[in-house]
Amino acid sequence: MEEKQKHQEPIGEGLESVKGRLSGQSGKSYWRSLDELADTPQFQAWMEDEFPNRSTLLELNRRDLLKYMGASMALAGLAGCRGVFLPQDKVVPYVKAPEELVTGKPLFYATAVTLGGYATGVLVEQIEGRPVLIEGNPDHPASMGALDVLSQAELLNFYDPDRGATVVEQVNPGTFDTGNPSSWELFDEFFGKTVKPAALKNGAGLRILTGSTTSPTFVSTMTTFLAAYPGSKWHAYEPIGRSNVHEGAKLAFGKPLDTTYDFTNAKVVVSLDGDFLSPTANPGSLKYAREFANGRRVKGLTGTMNRLYSFESTPGLVGGVADHRWAVKPSEVFGVASALAAALGVAGAAAATTPYQKAIDAIVKDLQSVPGGALVVTGDNQAPEVHALVQLINEKLGSFGKTVNHIEPVDATTSETVGDLRSLIADLKAGQVETIIIVNSNPVYDAPADLKFAEAIAKAKHKIKLGLYDDETGQACNWFVPITHSLEEWGDARAFDGTYSVMQPIIAPLYEGRSVIEILSILSGKPHSGYDLVKATWRKSGLVAGDFEKEWRKIIHDGLLKNSGSKPVTVASTLSASTLVGPKKTSGLEVILLADPCIYDGKFSNNGWLQELPKPLSKLTWDNVAMISPKTATSLGIVDEGVVDLTVNGVTVRTAAFVQPGHPEEAVSVYLGYGRTRGGVVCSLPNGDGHLAAGDPRSPGGFFNSISNFDGGGFNGYLFRTSTAPHFTTGELKAVGGVTTVATTQGHAPIDGDHVKQFEGDTRTVVVEYDLADFNKNAAKYVKENKEKSTEIRDQNLYPDKIFSSESPQWAMTIDMNTCIGCNACVTACQAENNIPVVGKVQVARHREMHWIRIDRYYSGDTENPQLTWQPVACVHCEKAPCEPVCPVAATVHSHEGLNQMVYNRCVGTRYCSNNCPYKVRRFNYLNYTDNQRQFDVRVDDKQRIPLLRMLNNPDVSIRGRGIMEKCTYCVQRINEARIEAKKAGREIQEGEIITACQSACPTQTIVFGNMNDPQSGVAQWREDPRAYLLLENLQTRPRTSHLAKVRNPNPEIAPVTKTETTS
Amino acid sequence: MALTPLNDSMITGSQDYASIDNSISSMIIDQKRHTRPWFIMFTFGVMGTGLLGAAITWLLYQGVGIWGNNIPTAWAFDIVNFVWWIGIGHAGTLISAILLLLRQPWRNSINRFSEAMTIFAVMCAGMFPLLHTGRPWVAIYWLFPYPNIMGLWPQFRSPLMWDVFAVSTYFSVSLMFWFIGLVPDFATLRDQSKNKFARVLLAIACLGWRGSQRHWHRYEQAYLILAGLSTPLVLSVHSIVSFDFASSVVPGWNVTVFPPYFVAGAVFAGFAMVLTFAIPIRKLYKLEDLITMRHIDWMAKITLATGLIVAYGYTLELFYAWYSGNPNEWDMTLLRRLSGPYAWAYAALIICNIVAPQAFWFPSLRRNLTVVMIVCQFVSVGMWLERFVIIPMSLTANYLPSANRMYYPTFWDFGMFAGTIGFFIALMFLFIRFMPVINIFEVKDLLYKLLGHRDSQIALKPVEVETVGGAH
């Protein structure tokens, strides 16, 4: 009897509650509510089960079974017209197929995604109406065809089942109540009846807080809004803002300006803690990386390379590729800049004393030797004074107009134009704010701790959050109003260089969100569709010359207005360096707070792809830690992965120490964006409903946070942030004993994985490096030596030199270790293209991450400041693949085109192939990782998820179940597509027709793929390059992927020239 | 022989055919002989079997991810246990087949339960290669070369494929050999049993054996043929298992000495396991007259001899790692084993497999049952560690340093291993209770020979004859 009761519960209770909810609602809501019926937890669990009948059939009796069959058929029908994908009333079959749509053929749409307000142009691959991949837009100056990890991962954000789906009214803001689902009608009624009359009467009580924006339409909509409510005010706060750049320019030139760089002709580059290659540190990184890498590409027997010096705090991408690197505290950078300025003879620069004087003298000589080719850059984290000083240095070097350009600020929310967070909080505290509307930012979580935003916002009477996620700020507000994702809306934005981009919807909104501009236009009483708003703004702007309608169509097609980058302004400094008082090197432990290279400021923390992406140097996933140098660890008595207490401004957080070679001494780096308490199951800590109760030991600062909680999640670095010292401050670090687990994908285990040379007489060909001067002199000799070695190795066996002599194309790849900057773009691109699952922290800690391509990191030299070599490794498609003969069921076999193929359907999962793979590139589905409904449920909560993530998958790539081996396929689906097209056209596959996912995303064009049978192809030429070598050639596996040796270009005056080949 | 003559004949005490019949068959006919120790051991076994069932259920439900295996260590406890169990079985085949062909009649009182051990050990072993696969529900038949319309065949070049044939042949031949040997004894039991039900069952099991001359003739022929078939298996099965490793490119696996060294190790571990069971059982069921100190002594000697071969194997492994000039091999085989994170395992292995068996040089220690038991436990642990050192440890670090990873087992790794031990114990104790533990007719045959082909009705004194010489 009791059992029977249990099974009747889902439907019985569901119906009752639906009836309750239905009362008093209009007919349109009826459908949505029935969906909720279909979404009862038990029903969902049953529906999403791999073998749905497994558990229930055992327990069901015949009558129940029949009842459920009837019910489930009825409900399955309902589930089909689920309002979450499309409004129910719009679902109609094609009467006439949409133009250009061919079932099974992808369509590409140009649009843009933004990061910190800055646009990157993208092409979104759409298959049968759903976006499946985001790639760079080759025409867009901020992308040039490549794409950074964050922009690629927007796709997963778009499908995120945790996104705010409906309007929610929170009766008790600030508590852990989940609030009541409401509707647009009710919100409209609330706004019209409660907020509007008061706001019209006293507009000063209405405030809007946004993040940074560059969107002309947003600005014009805001202008309309502010005009509709006179006295209302716009404030902006961006946690990883660029205000230092603007302030620095203001100091130097008297007005805020953006500085853009041109690395095309840069011969000598000095970075003063400026990570211009990292998308989280500079919005122009993709372009800079492309140009920088082009300046380092060595082809043939001789070459030229630019030279990069880096004074760096937290080890980042720039330091990784620098020819000379010094680890400095952030507070030390001003001193270094001063010394550089003084040595260059910048007016007013006083000679500062730094330990790097000798190096600086050499650098100055080098800089002066390349007139017009010198470039000094600094980072957004550095104080305005450093930026001003760097402007003076570049001016002195004569770089203005050559390697450095200045443009009017692209950001529409500089301190000149809108209010800042501090003044908003002052007003809030003074009780002057009646209604606050927060647009897609999360200040409760990410505002500087000393401003106490959460306390201040409680003083406002009406708090409205417009956002993608019902996050910490949503919790503090009365209303949560969902907005659309950038793939679902019309909009526009500008790139770092000012280029205007248009964003178009790729799909109808998945949830009930509306775009911000639409909401603002509704609230200001002049409702317009997003399309009309954008078009009107562009029409009015005068940007488009000629026939607007015609041009407009072209702009939408291109995704941008070509050549619309801001015109450089000519500037001259009005400043004497002597008046600049910058930060002084601190003596104690310095705490560096910076954007996470994967999840940025926390906006991406509910994104499984990015959480599991190994951070470039540390290879850490799912966590932030207290990162310190080996020497500091020793002096503080801290062991790697030991538990430590980090105290800043009286706030103590318990976390794990992480010993990072190359980290500056007496400093600890903390990545922001972790320790979220609300906003999705991936990012926030569990407590039944996904929210943490007050005082929970897992809350930020609580004991279990990031330590015993094996699920990861890290701690909230914003707790350390103050409005006066947002980027670096001082603090205390102390070991408390014990060791914890952090999940890394390389090293950090008793088995050392960081150094190549591990024993005497090592013959492995792993990393090959040259010194440029030496290479230019002796390349021919090295080529001869290598050839002899290869011949000797090849002579040892009986196989013919050319194993695959077929006339068909022979696929091959080259990876240039010299231009690889370790940015991970290829890893995420591969993950998106090839449906690679996210496995969670526990599985990464067990070394079961699934990424098909990994970027190996090798250190060489001193542990305090080692040199770094990146080596991307995916399946190298050996011609004599050791994995093939050992598979007992022949599930991995060779194609006549030289691909080492994995036949998923035939694989029984003995894993012998992986054991016998010398490159360890095979990945095994130890558990059912691709169960999409649960793959991001790294934390369990009660919330039922909509199986949206099924739609994310690329239909051209098989989904791998548990117990299956998988690995890089050279994007065989793209090869096959090109082959079909070629056959249809009756021609050969052309060079450049096949671009693998990793190749396409790579900002530095490090990866080249093609047919090596075609001597004209890029890959055939690169394979014959003097730098080309085969990984582990001595094993005679004959890889199809060749690596190209790294070349360093050190200044002989700083380091003695030695041939630094790390293998014999 | 200056030693004090030991009570070391192959049969001791006053024995005639009836007393031998009685002392063995009473274990089945008189079920009251099985007292508390049997129940304790059987309960252990059943609990272990339960754990095994739970481990397998959870494994099938969740996937191999419940174990600690990772990339690069894709094989760990699963294959370690497989090789260990297969090795255990080898003593049985050696005793029953090779010693039979070599006309060593002392095998007669230990061959039956060694053969049972072989079969049960192969059953335990066989579980692992199947269940360690990602998809056992297809692996169970896709590895066999069955004709199919897709024209898909297994990969005959894969050592795992050879394993399938080696292990399945081994199991079927061992089972057949064991059963044929049991036929005359089933007949004896049928004749002695009072229970009607048991008599019917035994009558079916003994295939209508009447003990006629023709029956004996056929029996001897069949038995010899099967012994001939089994003999190469002793050498081939573990050689083929060792090919899984020897034919790969993994440093630490790619060693040509593996086949003989694995076979010696198997016999070594097998004899240790036979002793582990023989010593308590002969005491519990008062079989000291049939499994005498001489048996123990000789088995200890074989353990020592094979142990020395294994030690020689270790030395050769090191020697060839150096002599081949392959630095990767040297790194894995010597440096990492001596100073790597798993150095403890290698040290323990040397102590267990090389140091401990040296006790068997001393006759007094060989005849001290406590010492023998302890050394045998060392050997069992040592042989398990040997496979641990070879299999997962070699995988943790091979060619690309970036791929080096530690391996840590989970509860289910241990659970499944403990489960198979329980399953093995349960089967062994069921066997002890329901089947003749010692080959009745062969012991009687031995007695006949020991008495110089005389009638056995005469009460015996401890026999002085040391050699059986010219056994025929």
Image: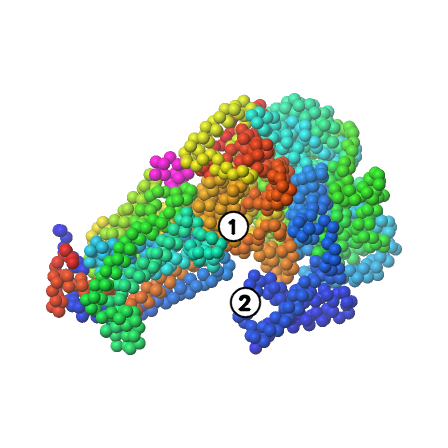
Q: Is residue B324 magenta?
A: yes
Give the residues in magenta: B320-339
Instruction: Measure the C-alpha gap from mark 2 to mark 1.
Output: 31 Å
Query: Quick check: can you spot residue B391?
Result: no
The residue positioned 73% from the left and 54% from the top of the image is A97
Query: Quick check: can you spot residue A141?
Result: yes
Residue B40 locus on image (x, y percent): 34, 67
Task: Tell me which corner region of the image, top left, top right, bottom left or bottom right, holds residue B213.
Answer: bottom left
Residue of label 2 = A55
Quadrant of the image containing the N terminus of chain A: bottom right
Observer-nearest of B9 and A598: B9
Residue of label 1 = A903
The residue at the far right in this view is A201
Magenta span: predominant SS is helix
> Relative to B29, is B468 above or below?
above
Residue A993 locus on image (x, y percent): 63, 40
- The amino acid beneath tag 1 is Val
- The amino acid beneath tag 2 is Ser
The residue positioned 47% from the left and 62% from the top of the image is B57
Q: Contact (CB < 8 A) between labels 2 and 1?
A: no
Residue B293 locus on image (x, y percent): 20, 58
Q: Is residue A747 magenta?
A: no
